[in-house]
Image (cartoon, helix red, strand yellow):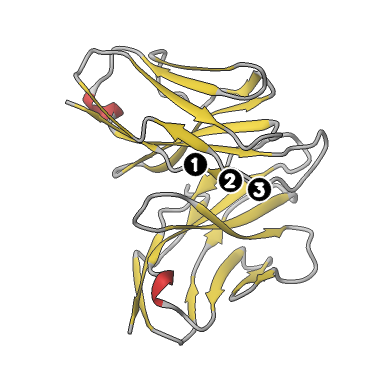
Amino acid sequence: AQKITQTQPGMFVQEKEAVTLDCTYDTSDPSYGLFWYKQPSSGEMIFLIYQGSYDQQNATEGRYSLNFQKARKSANLVISASQLGDSAMYFCAMREGLRGGYNKLIFGAGTRLAVHP
Amino acid sequence: GAGVSQSPSNKVTEKGKDVELRCDPISGHTALYWYRQSLGQGLEFLIYFQGNSAPDKSGLPSDRFSAERTGGSVSTLTIQRTQQEDSAVYLCASSYLETGGTTDTQYFGPGTRLTVL
């Protein structure tokens, strides 16, 4: 079974509008972390935002916020006031066993976002 | 400071040849990771180093793949007798992982695009 599911292969949004990229995950470990990365056409993976399973509040970083719904096992990325430079591939990733020493990230298939002027 | 660097940025080789891919992590980062990104498989974990030891090699696809890390810094991923299915982008990431720590954000390099003819 897939551990990280991103159901939107492609999304588009009008410049200056907000967009939500979906991510659901599957784990039985109570201790885990969720990450979002951006991959522009240049290929580099850029860290955007992190949410820990024990964090009480949703993470925010500038125009990025994470809508964390633990009971639904979802961690959607919200980008506010979209800019043309936001056009890229976006990956949701999970690290399980934060206290157990497991360190690898498990990635979703990604969502390609296109921002239109 | 400087980010994660990888070399070469592109490598074209013939089937059956050996290749070496290099990763220079962010200075001071204790953990180093190799991932592979291919069209059919998405992003997949290969190996993880803590210092010079590799506690998790579970993602290496075959015994043709090996990696080492020296001086707690530079890492080399070696692929012997390359096959066409090895064609992919090989991404390196590093993080500062404290013993018993939970949050460790992995920062990625630009990747090496390997093409096996």
Same chain, marks 3 and 2?
yes
In the image, what residue type sits under mark 1? Gly
Packing grade of label 1 (10 A; few <14, some 14-19, many >=20) is many
Q: Which residue is mark 1?
A: B109
The residue labelled by disc 2 is B107
Kindly report which numbered mark, 3 or 1, lies closer to the viewer in this rendering: 1
Q: Residue B112 at x, y = what percent?
A: 37, 35
Q: Could you say which quadrant of the image residue A78 lies in?
A: bottom right
Rendered position, A85 above or below A1: below
Question: Residue A104: x and y, percent?
Answer: 59, 38
Provide the chain ID for the residue under circle 2. Answer: B
Q: Position of residue A99 (x, y in %)?
A: 78, 40
**CB under 8 Å between callouts 3 and 2?**
yes
Q: Whole-Å distance between the Cαs marked 3 and 2?
A: 6 Å
Between B40 and A62, the residue placed more toward the observer is A62
Q: Is residue B96 above or below residue B7?
A: below
Residue name at image x 74 percent, y 37 percent: B97
CA distance separating discs 3 and 1: 13 Å
Judging from the image, what secondary structure is the residue with disc 3 in? loop
User: In this picture, is B47 found above or below B67?
Assistant: below
Distance between the alpha carbons at the discs numbered 2 and 1 = 7 Å
Q: Are marks 3 and 1 on the same chain?
A: yes
Labels 2 and 1 positioned on one and the same chain: yes
**10 Å crowding of disc 2: few (<14), some (14-19), many (20+):** many
Number of disc labels = 3
Left or right: residue B60 compared with residue B113? right
Residue picked out by circle 3: B105
Q: Mark 2: which amino acid?
A: Tyr
Kindly identify the residue that appears in the image at 70 percent across and 50 percent down.
A32
Which residue lies at the image location 49% right of the left edge and 83% below the top edge? A18
Could you tell me the amino acid type at mark 3?
Thr
